[in-house]
Image: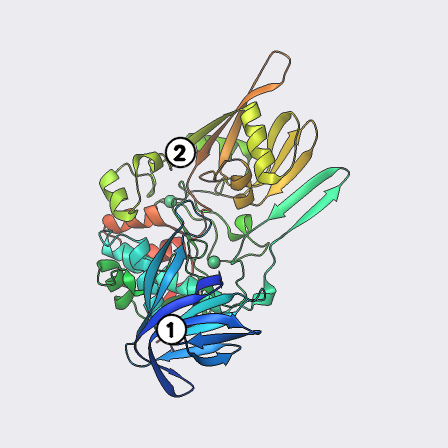
Amino acid sequence: MDEPKIKVGICDGYPEIRGRLNGVYRMNGSPLAGEFTARPREGAIGLYDAFDREVLRRGQIRLLAEGKGTFTLREVTIGVRFHWERREEQTFSGDLILMLSEQGTLVAVNEIPVEEYLMSVVSSEMSGEAPFAFLKAHAIASRSWLVAMLSHSKAEKGNGWESEVLREREVVRWYDREDHALFDVCADDHCQRYQGTSVRMSGRAAEAVRETRGVFLIHEGKICDARYHKACGGLTENFSTCWEERSVPYLSHVSDSARPHAPLRTEGEAERWILSSPDVFCHTKDEGLLRRILPSFDRETADFFRWQVSYGRSELEKILRKKSGIDFGILQNLVQVQRGFSGRIRLLRIEGSKAIVTVGKELEIRRWLSPSHLYSSAFIVSTTRDPSGIPTRFTLSGAGWGHGVGLCQIGAAVMAEKGYTTEEILRHYFHGTALVKRY
Ligand SMILES: [Zn+2]
Ligand SMILES: [Zn+2]
């Protein structure tokens, strides 16, 4: 196969886009360089030069980089919807496509070869000081996930259901590759943070991408949808606990250890597991290593392997009301209805005096039960009650960080530190897969 290209949405919903073409760009064969401004103009896009003269007006404008051309966009909003939203000038290599959104605002898309995109995102997400076998395993997993995602047809995605039976509601949602209409991925944390060529691409993380160029995880001839998460908690989870109801053989339960462990099948087993402290790959207290894996690691995130969150009843009622939009009245019980093999809850029944709602899947549960997100949905609930039986406090004791499907990042880094090779790490998390170089 040829190296695929990816369309990254840099600006979306802008009234105007200002920038500079560094080096020569071509537009329908004619060269263009220097400062430019784009504005919506009578249902099309007007492109203006440094003297504000209209150069072109068209529904979509595609500027093709010649050689190593780059372009700079001014005042790109980064961290959209996050508390650290700010505006910066950013430089990108590759082609620039300007489009109009349905609302008539401007969209800027950067189209680049997949390897170049990976180099940028892997270098900004991973610390170059992490073990090299781990960086290579991660580069292969990220590449496989990305290309599998690009080849999926956008129509086949479902995102959950809501139903109402006998006054009891069921809200089951999952968030799988939320679609962007005009591009493949956005440049923000929503998809993967991408800061163009302004990030250093020379580190060990970029080298890991370069060294594994074109290498994919393959299952039955197809590129794997290789998911990853921070820490499984000792057992990884099945795909269907988090997303659509279908079986993905290489995204199923594994023990994050050299020793096998049976899947958790009963509530008793889940409870014993979550309250235990097993010796597994992602159970590390090595802060030095953690800092080398997670650039943003701090002491607050140190208790990801086994954690506890405790809420007073009215505090949790408030959180639930805000996050779900449902008034539960007096909160009475949190009951797990169904768990996956790693102990992650896939359906949770929330019983209040005014409403009883069953919520799923794992991400929606994590969202509803926390002002931000719970570390994971693998938790058990202990409820303290007053003498009349009304709850006063809910304490959640949990395991792991993230959805738990596929590669466990912390476990994989520990494996690399212990001397496992890139291939051994990938085979451990993605059963029945092979590594194949496709270009
Ligand atoms: Zn996105
Ligand atoms: Zn793990």
Neighbour tally class for label 1: few under 14, some 14-19, many 20 plus, Cα within 10 Å: many
- Between 173 and 382, the one nearer to me in the picture: 173
Q: Is residue 337 left or right of residue 208?
A: right
Residue 219, located in which quarter of the rendered image?
Answer: bottom left
Residue 176 percent across, percent down from the top left: 53, 56
Say which label, 1 or 2, has the lower sequence index.
1
Q: Quadrant of the N terminus?
A: bottom left
Residue 276 percent across, percent down from the top left: 41, 31
Residue 306 is marked as 2
Neighbour tally class for label 2: few under 14, some 14-19, many 20 plus, Cα within 10 Å: many
Looking at this view, name the residue that lies furthest to the top: 387
Query: Is residue 323 shown above or below 99?
Result: above
Do residues under tags 1 and 2 come within 8 Å of each other at their CB atoms?
A: no
Looking at this view, name the residue that lies furthest to the right: 166
Q: In this view, does 363 lie to the left or right of 354?
A: left
Residue 431, located in which quarter of the rendered image?
Answer: bottom left
Where disc 2 sits, the SS reads strand
Residue at disc 1, CB closer than 8 Å to ligand 1: no
Instruction: Locate ligand 2 by image quadrant.
Output: top left
- Between 363 and 253, the one nearer to me in the picture: 363
Residue 206 is marked as none
Residue 36 is marked as 1
- Between 107 and 303, the one nearer to me in the picture: 107
Residue 305 percent across, percent down from the top left: 38, 37
